[in-house]
Image: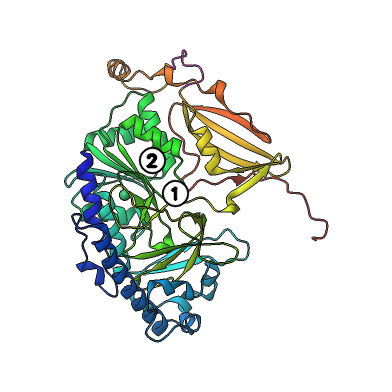
Amino acid sequence: MGFSRQKERFHSVNFQQGTGMTQLAYSYKINPLQPPAAELRRLRALQLTRLNATIAHARAHSRFYQQHLAGVAPNGLASLEDLPTLPLMDAGVFNHGLEALLCVSPAEVSRIVTLETSGATGEPKRVAFTAADQQATRDYFAAGMRMLADAGEAIAVLYPCERPGGLGALLLEACEQMGARPLAIGIPNSFAALAASLGREQARGLVGFPQHVFSFARWCEYNRIKLKISGVLLSADNVAATLRNEIARIWNCDVFEHFGMTESGYGGAVDCPHHQGLHVRESDLIVEVIDPLSGQPRASGQWGELVISTLGREAMPLLRYRTGDHSRLLTGTCPCGSPLKRISSVRPRAAEQIIAGGQTYSMAQLEESLFALPGVLDFKAELDDRASELLITVQLLGDPEPKQESSEQCSPKPDERRDQQLQRQPDQSIQKPLLQLPQWPGTRTIIEYSPEFRPYYPAKRTITRLPGVRTASPSSQ
Ligand SMILES: [Zn+2]
């Protein structure tokens, strides 16, 4: 896939979305030949109009927002610079219940997503969308899918696809919308079957959880299976640089990183072919970075908590919503020339760090180190509270005793099997990570070999706690 063609696509597609209440963004399409400064003025004017329309909509239809936005002038904000005068809101807002936040009649809601919160006191978050809200997401995804493949080509979606209106289903529909052939794969449970399917369909694009795509790429290389993947989009979890570079190397393809959350309407920010930060979905979102303690805005370049405001969201608009995630706004202009703001790769929140053996560990940090080791297919990390020990189980490619051929199993006919072996003799030279496993304080490592992939995490990766006897609190019971 030609670089310049991808670049042009990125310029021309990211402003087409924006359905919803105002329909304003539909008419807005960026011209890559115009200087970014002129585009920027158009974009900011559009954002202010949509922001004020959202404020008016929220205030008119929600009990919560009537009170929450009581201090805002009837006509809304005079400029985008006034956005920090709106009060912040956080996940606690969902404790008010769906009805208090809903800005349309229940009949107009086409999907409600329920998210469990990690906090002990938090109610599950329930986020509602109308059909137009979902279409806005589809439009944004369709723009992203154009970076992976052309119309007529196949794009494989490695998320669960069964639930209507869910992430996987919206991605499939977005592929159709941009003219590609969507392949509903789901979470892969057999890499051999997946490789066969992608080969048969000549898939060019791949969308999925970072570690599933990574493991699959490594498995393909080890088994000498060649696929013609031209573009990969990784989303819904942290994207370790080592993981991303390895996918790009194995398939010689472009690897894009996407950040989004249910509250942002799934889509949030995605990088361009220059890979210098993630361009924000600015037609549908305004992004700020604040000091997590004081709530004051942080200057560009400074890390802080990411805050989002939705533009044109009908069912459940969010205004200055604290995501709990950390990032920073990047300064300067991207080499692609896009006027869209960029953020750094989003860092996991502090709550996702654990302490073992006096050391602080995060999944993101473990991923950077362990995925860099050759032959590592996957790993899981479990905290043993009693021992204050982090148990790391590493899945390695191949067979612990590759010389022993198992001849007993039900297998293909002898001539078929010989063909398969001739075509894809596993590359044993790739399997040599044992000597390099890091020795971290407070950790214990277990090695598991796997000729076939067994995903440790069906979704987002986190450090889990081992079930077991917890230290009893003397005051309880
Ligand atoms: Zn760019």
Task: Say few, some or many: other residues with alpha carbon within 10 Å of mark 2 (under 14 / 14 to 19 / 20 or more).
Answer: many
Please, which residue is most extreme toward the left here?
152
Which amino acid lies under the numbered mark 2 shown in the image of this protein?
Pro
Q: Is residue 349 left or right of residue 315?
A: right
Residue 400 shown in magenta: yes
The residue depicted at 51 percent of the width and 71 percent of the height is 88
Quarter of the rendering containing residue 164: bottom left
Q: Nearer the viewer, mark 2 or mark 1?
A: 1
Q: Is residue 416 visible?
A: yes
Comparing 420 with 410, the one in front is 420
Comparing 112 with 12, the one in front is 12
Q: Is residue 435 left or right of residue 128?
A: right
Residue placed under numbered mark 1 in the picture:
345
Residue placed under numbered mark 2 in the picture:
188
Task: State how far apart marks 2 and 1 are (Cα).
Answer: 26 Å
Task: Residue 30 in the image: state x and y as whole percent.
Answer: 22, 60
Q: Is residue 41 above or below residue 447?
A: below
Q: Secondary structure at mark 1?
A: loop
Residue 441 shown in magenta: no
Residue 112, numbered label: none
Q: Which residues are magenta?
A: 399-406
Task: Residue 463 in the image: state x and y as whole percent.
Answer: 58, 45
Q: Is residue 26 above or below residue 239?
A: below
First-in-chain label (2 vs 1) = 2
